[in-house]
Amino acid sequence: MALDRRSFLAACSRAGITSALLPGVLYTLAAQDASALSADADSDAKPAELQKITAEMLDQAAMLAGVGPFTGEQKQMMLERLNGQRDSYAPIRALKMANSVAPAFVFHPLPAGAKLPLQSMSPYSPATPIPDTPAHIEDLAFATVSELASLLRAQKVSSVALTKMYLDRLKRYDSKLHFVITLTEERALAQAKKADEEIAAGKYRGPLHGIPWGAKDLLAVKGFPTTWGAGGFEHQSFEEDATVVQRLDAAGAVLVAKFTLGALAMGDKWFGGRTRNPWNMAQGSSGSSAGSASAVAAGCVAFAIGSETLGSISSPSTRCGATGLRPTFGFVPRTGAMALSWTMDKLGPIARSAEDCSLVLAEIHGPDGKDASVYPASFAWDPGLDWKKLRIGYLKSEFDSPGPLKLAEVKADETTEEKQKREEQNVQMKAASERRDYDRRFELAALEKLRAMGVTLTPVELPKLPYDAMTSLLTAEAAAAFDDLTMTGRDRLLTEQGAEDWPNIFRIARLYPAVEYIQANRARTLAIQQVSALFDEVDIIVTPSTDTQLLATNLTGHPALIVPNGLRGDDAPTPPKIDDGEHDDIGGPGTPVSLTFLAGHYQDAKLAAFAWAYQQARGFHKLHPKLD
């Protein structure tokens, strides 16, 4: 069974313990008082004065780090330097660097010799005819961006009317779905009025002109809070709009709301509650782009911007039945967005169709002169692309049945507690296997549909590499991004405080070795090279929205497009009573499943064109939940 997202983070945390950085461990061991941080999380608490590192501490640290044992002579040689190295942390910590300060290195996922697409942008032409003017404006709640753009350009509806309709729906359904942190109503109505005036004057800016949208609340918007979904940040604000916000403003799009995200971009639980899945409101929306996916799926906004570091567009798009485009790493500037992992964070659209996602990506991609990771690659979206000329692969093993389920076996001298734990584990494994087997029928049907469309499918496989071991890169960077929370004790303000939540993960990540961080990056180079080689054989890869490919391609920076792939029937496995947030496939009867398409670096336009062809053949993007 593939690991789920939260298990990746938990495994990463466990790896941090067993391969701890010696000076980091010693820093902890030398603290005079483990409770030295003030209980007042709002104060400028400082760590207690540290003891000198001793030979005994070094023995303990070596055991944790999995190195040594060291001889007495070796330890004596190490101690003076270790004490000095530990002392070097203080002046850097005293800088109190903001989350926006990036490390002095830039990650680019392109393998050596790779070339960027540099063709000019093709002119936009609607792929759908102009719809009829609706009898009621709310009949357009689930219309695509392309359909709305046609109506707006023809002045059959106004941006003000659309904006008011979506604002009304956001207010009406927020009490059920909890997807809004801040409505930007006054700003939105002013933008909509301006859009209508410009369109009437013949000053049409393009397909997003007058289209209402929502931003994940890790994007800075001047004049409004930017909360990052986290306790302790409810009133945080910035004096400049994020680059993506600036570009959508320039395109004439209308910002109606800032949407929820799980605290500091994990899950769907934020400081105000939990964002819900509009198909099954007893469950969370998944995350961390929780509000973005939920609001789009609920017909409360035309499109939204989400972000992904390790599944935060894919997972809520899957759970909520939306279409999500996670662009190539380095395609969309992240200036003005919360940093979680400088080498893995990506911003991208969540919408109703691959075409909609393309119209948004066309406006937000490209260098801004501030985010050094962004390459000047082109995005030549062509809805008329002859996708039949593309070479299509599929991850064969991900579609195959895994075979008989291997349950935990009875151990000799098993205690009552161990027996209970084993039985609970086996129940969970059986339920997960049953859900996976049920959803596989949708995935196999997708392959049959593709063949019926005339596609020749070439089996391919992901390289066998320890992707899960590389996720410590994410948590090490995240711990650095939020170092101040750990060092001041303000991590206590975060809603979730379990073993797999950020406060504990940040603490453990401080013990992750610098050497191991570099070694994991070297392994990542191998992953980039080997995964990229697959796209020498095929243009597009079709895969279930499973965690193995999700982890691999987030590490390698390849783009992914997640599309709805049908609804589970009444015979679907019953969902668990408690949604623990660890699995995206627990929706139960009447909930959506998804399919994922992958492509080579900066081949996002080609990826979207093929996914759009599949969506048009299936029509699943037109399904929507009944909210009343």
Image: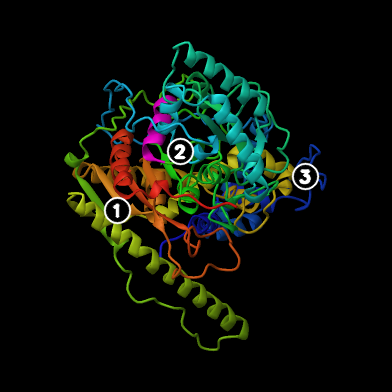
> Is residue 211 or residue 594 the one in the foreground?
211
Residue 580 included in the magenta stretch of the image: no
From the image, which quarter does the N terminus lie in? bottom left
Disc 3 designates what residue? 48
Q: CA distance from mark 3 to mark 1?
A: 48 Å
Residue 69 visible within the image = yes
Residue 355 included in the magenta stretch of the image: yes
3 vs 1, front mark: 1
Instruction: Determine the main secondary structure of the stretch shown in magenta.
Output: helix
Mark 3 Cα-neighbour bin, 10 Å: few <14, some 14–19, many ≥20:
some
Based on the displayed image, in which of its 4 quarters is residue 169 positioned? top right
Disc 1 designates what residue? 462
2 vs 3, front mark: 2
Compared with 409, 252 (above or below) is above
Q: For this view, does 452 lie left or right of residue 441?
A: left
Mark count:
3
Mark 1 Cα-neighbour bin, 10 Å: few <14, some 14–19, many ≥20:
some
Q: CA distance from mark 2 to mark 3?
A: 58 Å
Tell me if label 2 and label 3 are in contact, CB under 8 Å: no
Disc 2 designates what residue? 143
Kind of residue indicated by mark 1: Leu
Q: Range of the magenta residues?
A: 353-365
Determine whether the residue tagged by mark 2 lies in a helix, strand or loop: loop
Compared with 545, 573 (above or below) is below
Compared with 114, 202 (above or below) is above
Kind of residue indicated by mark 2: Ala
Residue at point 36%, 36% (across, down): 355
> Is residue 361 or residue 339 the one in the foreground?
361
Q: Residue furthest front?
A: 135
